[in-house]
Amino acid sequence: MAQDPSDTSGMDLDGLLLPENGVVELTDKLTGYMTEIELGGLSDIIGQVLDDFLDQCGGMPEDLNDSTAFDQITRNQLAVTLAYQLGRLDGRSPQVVNLLVQQAIDSFGVKRMEESSDISDDDFQNPKELVYPRLRRLEYVEPPPEDE
């Protein structure tokens, strides 16, 4: 049986990056697709779990009375909710996600991610390609507990 050229499930995408405009377009297409289909509501308990993830990783403001707290909370809640829904979409219809990824690759191409974890000031001019992917790959080690 011939392999479907739009099937990226067998393709090794590890270390490959889309250019910034490709990331933006793929994000827009995935978000648009998620709004067109019915993934079902997010239960309040799962919402609480997502909020707790945010809180545990420092994504919630320390001062809830701060004038920017509401905006920060809702932006972060939107981001984790979209990530959650994308995971559900990928689990339910991986062929759709793979097709949209392949279309982005075909339209924009890919390049290899820099192996170095060193980030320069120049890299900040293009964070979606040169900063965020490398930060995601960093392995964080918890410091040993201090003796009391």
Image (spheres, helix red, strand yellow):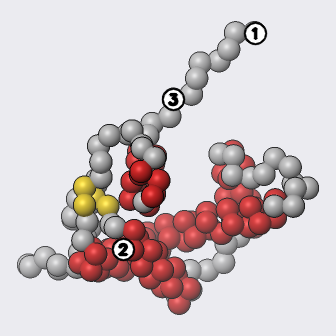
User: How far, Cα to Cα, is label 3 from label 2?
Assistant: 32 Å
Q: Position of residue 66 (x, y in %)?
A: 87, 56
> Which residue is at the far front?
122
Badge 1 element: loop
The picture places residue 124, in percent across and down from the top left corner, at 47, 53
Q: Name the residue rendered at 44%, 82% in the picture.
A: 29
User: Which label number is shown at residue 148?
Assistant: 1
30 or 39, which lies in front?
30
Residue 83 falls in image quadrant: bottom right
* Residue 22, picture quadrant: bottom left
Query: Which mark is in front, 3 or 2?
Result: 2
Residue type highlighted by circle 3: Val
Tell me: 120 left or right of 18.
Answer: right
Q: Give the vertical position of 3 relative to 52 (above or below).
A: below
Question: Which amino acid lies under the numbered mark 1 shown in the image of this protein?
Answer: Glu
Q: Which mark is residue 56?
A: none
- N-terminal label among 1 and 3: 3
Taking the spot 56% from the left edge, 80% from the top edge, the residue there is 39
The reply, left or right, for residue 143 in relation to residue 99 is right
Q: Residue farthest to the top?
A: 148
Residue 92 image position (x, y, % from top left): 44, 74
* Mark toward the viewer: 2 or 1: 2
Secondary structure of the residue carrying numbered label 3? loop
Residue 141 shows which numbered tag?
A: 3
For marks 2 and 1, give the CA distance.
51 Å
Provide the residue designation for mark 2: 22
Dot 3 or dot 2: first in sequence order is 2
Q: Quadrant of the N terminus?
A: bottom left
At horizontal 44% and vertical 40% (from top left) the residue drawn is 138
**Side of 132 relative to 6 (left or right):** right
